[in-house]
Amino acid sequence: MPDGLDFEVRVYAAMAAALMTYEDELEVEGAFNWRDTIEERLQAGETLSPEIAHLLAQADSVLIQASELLARRFPDLFHPQRKANIPRRNWWWHLDEGPQARERAEQVA
């Protein structure tokens, strides 16, 4: 199985595209965990080609657009105790705070 960062982003993009069909919290959690892996690799210094960076930005935008729906359908995913130790830079875990969660994360970073 491919393990490159490009592959990770492509899988995440597919997960983000399917968000509206998810019926179980674990499916959304899986997408968030996948995004965590991408963030860890980026923080470790790996880089993305312009094409893959654009794909990541598009997938992140899908998450932002779905923030209200996700918070409403899966409130336990965003429980304060659950996300208490999750850094702000991992804004996808804070989507219950609205679409500005990503902007807040960028301000903190």
Image: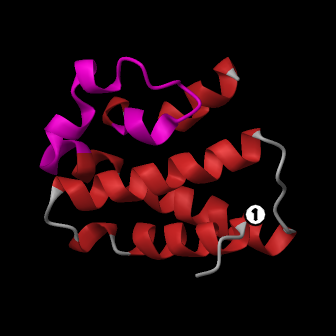
- Residue shown at 52% from the left, 53% from the top: 35
Q: Position of residue 80 (x, y in %)?
A: 26, 20
Q: Position of residue 95 (x, y in %)?
A: 38, 38
Asked whether, in this view, residue 22 is left or right of residue 42, the answer is: left
> Which residues fall within the magenta stretch?
71-95
Does residue 84 show up magenta in the picture? yes
Does residue 54 show up magenta in the picture? no
- Residue shown at 84% from the left, 56% from the top: 47
Asked whether, in this view, residue 33 is left or right of residue 107, the answer is: left
Question: How did the renderer colour the structure?
Answer: secondary structure
Up-down relation of residue 101 to residue 71 (above or below):
above
List the single residue furthest toward the front.
1
* Total marks in image: 1
Amino acid at the residue labelled 1: Ala
The residue singled out by tag 1 in the image is 53
Q: Residues within 10 Å of mark 1 (few under 14, many from 20)?
A: some
